[in-house]
Image: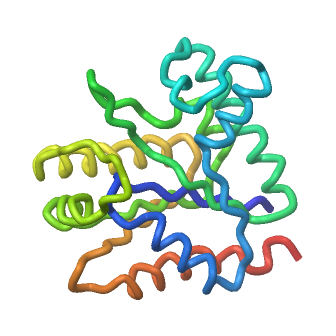
Amino acid sequence: MPFVVMITGIPGVGKSTITRLALRKARAKFRLVNFGDLMFEEAVRAGLVEHRDEMRKLNPNVQKELQMKAARRIVEMAKTEPILIDTHATIRTPVGYLLGFPKEVIEVINPNFIVIIEATPSEILGRRLRDLKRDRDVETEEQIQRHQDLNRAAAVSYAMHSNALIKIIENHEDKGLEEAVHELVEVLDLAVGEYD
């Protein structure tokens, strides 16, 4: 049976670090897939874009079709190996928040788990300010909390259309990175035996 885990979290929450470390420790060997990368590959293949930044300018209907193509690719991959999708549940735009997955797309992917990585707004803000390698949007703690709240709401919506379980993992400075990694490994290890 296909085993698909979606992992999401707002920028600065530590999602990439937790994911990387958990994949090393998990007994099940997941294929890490970035949903945006798959969409970009499909857009390039169709001759729609040359650079990733051009994706945002595509017609929303074209973007939705690219999402569907990426979703179908994930379904094919999941037939032979467990998949961990690195993605965004919601995307902050200049005019509002965009859901990362339309209903039709989440129904195709049909994830087993939706994992949300969270931290306090002050922790996220501090991490963003310390990470000089990334060009991140400046947000207030209130905006950061709103974005996390919207991610939770989006996860509930996605779960309604896929029967996925939702797991919230807190990545606090005092809790320790290792605990967050351990919690993700526990989810990933549920795939052990699914592909034997």
Q: Residue at x 42, y 48 (%)?
A: 155
Quadrant in the picture for residue 139: top left
Position above or below: 188 against 71: below
The residue lying toward the viewer, choosing from 87 and 103, is 87
Position above or below: 66 against 48: below
Q: Residue at x 61, y 50 (%)?
A: 34
The quadrant the C terminus occupies is bottom right
Task: Tell me: 50 left or right of 2.
Answer: left
Quadrant in the picture for residue 124: bottom left
Measuring from the top left, give residue 109's x and y in whole percent. Answer: 67, 44
Q: Residue at x 60, y 23 (%)?
A: 64
Way the structure is coloured: rainbow
Q: Residue at x 57, y 32 (%)?
A: 52
Quadrant in the picture for residue 93: top left
The residue lying toward the viewer, choosing from 190 and 56, is 56
The residue lying toward the viewer, choosing from 71 and 128, is 128
Task: Tell me: 126 left or right of 6.
Answer: left
Measuring from the top left, give residue 160's x and y in whole percent. Answer: 49, 43
Task: Tell me: 22 left or right of 95.
Answer: right
Measuring from the top left, give residue 10's x and y in whole percent. Answer: 35, 52
Residue that sits furthest to the front in the current view: 132
